Each structure stands twice: as C-alpha cells, then as structure tokens.
Amino acid sequence: MGERTPTEDPCSSPGGGGEVVDNGCEYMSRLALLYNNPKFSDIRLNVAGQSVFHAHKLLLATASDVFEQMLTNESWMDREQRELLLQEPDDCVAVFGDFIRYIYSGKVLLTIDTVLGLLVLADKYNVSDLKQCCVTYMNNHLVSTPCDNKAVQWFQYANACVCEPLQQSCVDYIVLNMDTVTQSPDWVCLETEHLEMFLQRSDLVIHSEHTLLMAVIDWLRAKHRVHKLRENLSRILPYVRFPMILPEHLSKFEESGFGKEHSDIFAPYLLVAYRYHALSIRGCKDHAWEVPLTQFRYRNYTDENYSIFVDIVRKGFKSCPRVSSKVERPLNLPAHIGNPAQDRQCKMKVVFYPHGYYMTSFWQGQLNISKATDDTKLIVSHRGGMEVREVEISVVVYAIHNQVKHAKYVVTEPHIFETHGTFEMENIIRLGELRADDSPYLIDDSLHLRVFIRPVNFQKPLA
C-alpha cells in the first residue's frame, strides 16, 4: 500500500460510498478564539512599541512567507523575551490588530479610512488574499463625494507599490472626474510628478481651464510645500493651458491677489493667452508661437461657454419604445475659443440611438422600421457653416454608484470631417447592460451621456 504524500487530500476522492463533511466554518470559529490569546501563545508581536499582540508562530508562518522568514531568523527575534519587534507607520499601527485578526479568522472590516493601512500590511507581509480583497474594495469605492474621496491617496500608493490594476482604475477615475478630485482633501497631497502627468493630458474632464488653474494654486499653497511656492510655480505653469482660459477669466485672474503677487512669473503666459484671443483664426495660424502647441489644445471642458459638448439624456429609458428613443442635439463649434459669432461656427448634429440603431420608412400612411440592430449607435454629422477640421470625439458614459453620479468610462476616436461628412461609433454601451434590472447606467431610469467634439489643432486651415 503506497504511502500518502502530505499534499494529498483524502476528501477530494472519498470513494466507497464515503461522504465529505465540511465543518470549515466551525473550525475557523474555534481558530479565531486564539486571536491575541496568551494561552498556548509562543510569540509576541510588538508593533512600534505602541501595542503588543499574543500570536502563534505556526499560524503566522502559514499565512505569510515573510513572517516565516522573520520567525526563523535570529536577527529578528528576541529569544529571551520571545518577542518580534515590528516597525510600522502610524496608519498601519492603527489597523494592525485587524490585520492579525484576519490571519486567525479570515474576516476583516474594510472602510475607506482603514483599507489603505491594511493593504500596506498585506503587501509588506505578502498576504495575497487580503491584498486582493483590499484592491477589490478600493476599486468598488473610488466613487464618492469630494469630502470622502481617496482617489489621489490610493493612486499614489498603487503607483509606489506597482499595483497596476488599482493604479489604472485610479487614473481613469481621476481623469474623468477631475472636478470631484480637485475638491477632495487629498488633492493637495498629489506628488509633483503626478500633477505634471495629469496636467499634460488633454482628456481631462474639467469645468474649465480656469477651474484647473485654481486647483493648481490650491496645490501650490498647501502648508507642506508653500516654502517652495515660486519654485513649484515655475515648474508647473508650463502645463496650464492659458490660451484655453476664457477671456473674462483671464482678466479676473490677472487682477487677483495671487496673480499680482507673482505677476513676474505669470506675465509671459498671460501675454500669450491675450495674444491668442486677440488674433483672428488666420492670424493664429500664421503666428509663430513661442510656447508648445499643446497649450492650444482643448481638454474636455464642461463649461458651456466653450461650446464643445452636448448632453444626451434619454429619460424613461425602460418604457421608451425603440422608434421613439432617438436623441438628437445640435452643436455649434466656435471657430475660435470665446468667439460665438454665428458666421464663424461649424454647425454639427449629434444623434444617438440608445435602444439600438434603426431606420424608418412610410408605407400606406404608417411609420415602419425598415432596418434595425441591437447595437447602440452615435452619428455626428457636419451640417454647414465653416469647414470643420480635425477633431477628437469623446463619449463620456455616466453611472450611479453608492448614490453618487459619476463619469464611468469614455470612448474616444479621432476623425477628420469632409464637407457635410459624418462620423459613426457603435456599441458605446451595450444594450444588454442598459436593459439589466440593476443597470448602473440608468439614473432614475434615465441614460446620461456627454459627447465632446474637441478641435485638435487650431493651426489647420478652417476654410
């Protein structure tokens, strides 16, 4: 009869009419009673001299290969006292008891205030299952009101520990919900290189460039970096797109106390912005600018004065029949920022089919659907006015989570319009996801999209 190896599980193939009995819950309950229990404890964990936990080497080593190395290395152990001294940051000290309790019970309470400390400990001691639980929780709780938002803090940790899934989730959320993030307490804690990274992006969804400038000034004035304000100001300002600030906001900022106090630094950027607004489109094209051309690229501005977006809202989505579901909106793209002159506009039409694309025809006085698909569809067409130029079309899809409306994701494609040309984009959002009973994309039974049409480069001829 062969000898069974330690890795074999006799319960996996009971055979002979055997029956597997699983009392795992009861076993874990008994094991949890050993948490911080001095009975049979053979090791104490001294956490930064602030708290001590009675523990058991076998359980620690089983849960963590890092603990295993520490418990078998004499340089870590005080053998006379049977104590392991652990140095942890304050955030981790506060939740270390919860961390050890998880090792004993497999249970932990995660909140937006405790999850980062637990993730740091799970990462440090390589408790991979707890680490995954923390990352999943964070991904599910990025959406929150500004006062509770932790996107900046979680992004910076994910970046430091190279946790790519969490890092990407945080970046996506920050880019699409910049107004919320800049109002959060953690905004001023963003590292300088990370602020530069975000400011270089044209896909930020933000109310206006002036709003972004005000957020940058809040960041500059943070107590922990105010001693380097002018140094940081010179470093960061090249990433603020002053020509994209509306003329009335430029004047207001120039007359502000902060603008006057540091006028020597702001002057060159304000001069470029005023010159840009003063020149005609043709003048802008012919002018030799001394700043990077990225200064003249639109972001996804939600201030209506930019006139680069339309809102697509289909109310009563579930009860609306396909033939009545189409949403159609006009958009007049200005040829020059802040210049609403009617003869200097490119006239666009945006049509969205939320219940799937269809075509209609009349037969014997009745309206009939002659062609239909189950693919949602967006059509953007040039309807006249000035010749349209190279653009980027972005569709932002909104959702509801934890009772907070937020931008969930974006689909972006570049396009060059011909005269009276059209652009089409299919399956921006799948019909099955919209029709699901618990669809996060229906806010009070309404679908909300925002379509941005951003001119890519003003220097290209417009006519």
Image: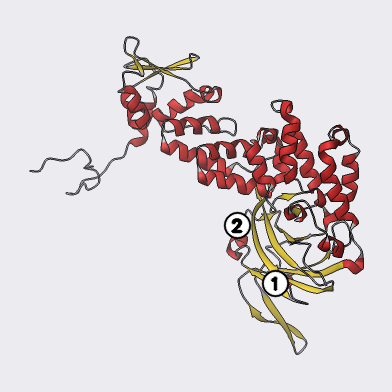
Q: Amino acid at mark 1?
A: Phe
Mark-to-mark CA distance, 1 and 2? 32 Å
Relative to the observer, which residue lies in front, 64 or 110?
A: 64
In the image, residue 76 sits, relative to residue 137, either above or below, namely above
The residue at the far left in this view is: 1
Residue closer to the observer: 10 or 308 = 308
Horizontal arrangement in the rendering, residue 396 relative to residue 117 (left or right):
right
Up-down: is 364 above or below 288? below
User: First in sequence: mark 1 or mark 2?
Assistant: 1
Give me the disc on residue 423. Answer: 1
Label 2 element class: loop
Which quadrant, please, contains the C terminus? Answer: bottom right
**Picture disc at residue 437:** 2
| Residue 271 locus on image (x, y percent) | 86, 47
Dot 1 falls on a residue whose secondary structure is strand
Q: Nearer the viewer, mark 1 or mark 2?
A: 1
